Image (cartoon, helix red, strand yellow):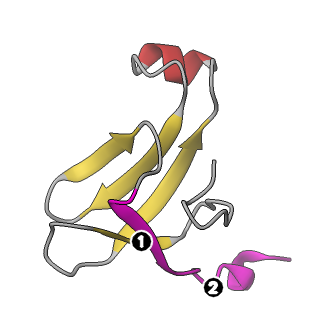
Amino acid sequence: MKYLDEQQVMVGDIVEVSGRAKTEVVVVEIIEPNSLQAIELNSPSGGVMIDDPATGLTLWPYMDEDISLVRRANLSIFDS
């Protein structure tokens, strides 16, 4: 899955959702199309799960102009 600017969506990305207060919203999971999880979530085309402090976990079935990458999280501290 990619943002509108063609950058790859990655777990840990900090994104902004337009129309919401400026808060850090985090991509916590990428749901692959036609996966069991996508079917269970009634989103066969997959999507991204974001963790929003205001609304909790939310599935976005596609990336549109409402979601933009703010920055990449530094996950290198978890690499061995």
Most foreground residue, 5 or 23 = 5
Q: Is residue 69 magenta?
A: yes
Residue 49 screen position, x and y as percent: 43, 47
> Would you identify the image quadrant in which residue 11 lies?
bottom right
Residue neighbourhood size for the residue with mark 2, other residues' Cα within 10 Å, grouped as few (<14), some (14–19), many (≥20)? few
> What's the amino acid at mark 1?
Val
Return the mark for residue 15.
1
Question: Contact, CB < 8 Å: mark 2 with mark 1?
Answer: no
User: Residue visible at 50% across and 38% down?
Assistant: 47
**Is 64 left, or right, of 55 in this rendering?**
right
Most foreground residue, 64 or 57 = 64
**Residue position for label 2:** 74
Give the spatial CA distance, label 2 vs label 1.
Answer: 14 Å
Residue neighbourhood size for the residue with mark 1, other residues' Cα within 10 Å, grouped as few (<14), some (14–19), many (≥20)? many
> What's the amino acid at mark 2?
Asn
Residue 51 screen position, x and y as percent: 33, 58
User: Residue visible at 67% across and 66% down?
Assistant: 7
